[in-house]
Image: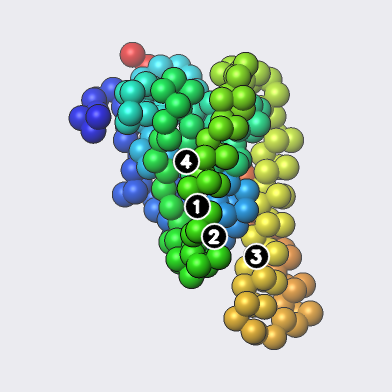
Amino acid sequence: MEDYDKKKYKILDWKHPLIMHWIINPGVAFNELILGQTIPKVMLIEREGNKPYYKRNLVLCPHCNTLHSGLKWSSQNKTAFKNWYGYYCDNCSEIIPVQRNLTSLLILTVTFPLWGWFRKSLKQRWLDKQPERFKALNLEIDEKKNTTKNWLKSGLYFSLYMYVIMVIIFPLIEQETITWKRLLISIPLWLIGGLGWGYTMKMWMNKKGKNK
């Protein structure tokens, strides 16, 4: 189903800056390959309604045409991670396609001889575990808990993650010299960047739709 009602929904696909960032940012490879954190190929955002963004975010299953709340794959339900093969649809038991990071694809291609022989059995083992993960889902969020503390924590986690990836891991892979000066200068830069990202996400996720 690709004939979306564009008057009712805002369509987020690979052309949207948020998803494009996911595709081209090398740091995202860690999220995809290690944590199993992914985003769907297409997201639908309800344009109208006095609800914040995270309650207007919908994911369509192309197999059964079920519109799922994006909260089905969230930290509060412990389903935000371990989605290596895609988003599991608990209505038809099929897999909803997700976007792939370019660096992840490159790594998977290079290492294919190591895991390619086991890809079918690994996928089936993952699929067998999904029904249990999606039992007793909570699709409501207590907005009183969506406080300043949460975006600060998210921003600090993002700062630490990007600092380690960009300042330590990538230079080691590229066999660059890591100096104390570089390590110290990068701390405030990534701290500011991380807090800015956390605050931006807070504002975006709480943005409400147009009134009817």
Please tell me whether mark 2 sits on a helix, a strand or a loop.
helix
Q: At which x and y percent is residue 210?
A: 37, 22
* CB under 8 Å between discs 1 and 2: yes
**Which residue in the rendered view is the most extreme toward the left?**
3
Q: Which of the two discs, 3 and 1, labels the residue nearer the N terminus? A: 1
Q: CA distance from mark 1 to mark 4?
A: 14 Å
Q: Which of the two discs, 2 and 3, labels the residue nearer the N terminus? A: 2
Q: CA distance from mark 3 to mark 1?
A: 27 Å
Label of residue 115 in the image: 2
The residue where tag 4 is placed is 86
Q: Give amino acid for label 4.
A: Gly
Label of residue 165 in the image: 3
Nearer the observer: mark 4 or 3; the answer is 4
Q: CA distance from mark 4 to mark 3?
A: 24 Å
Please tell me whether mark 1 sits on a helix, a strand or a loop.
helix
Q: CA distance from mark 4 to mark 2?
A: 18 Å
Q: At which x and y percent is residue 204?
A: 51, 36
**Tag 2: Cα neighbours inside 10 Å, few (<14), some, or many (≥20)?**
few
**Tag 1: Cα neighbours inside 10 Å, few (<14), some, or many (≥20)?**
few
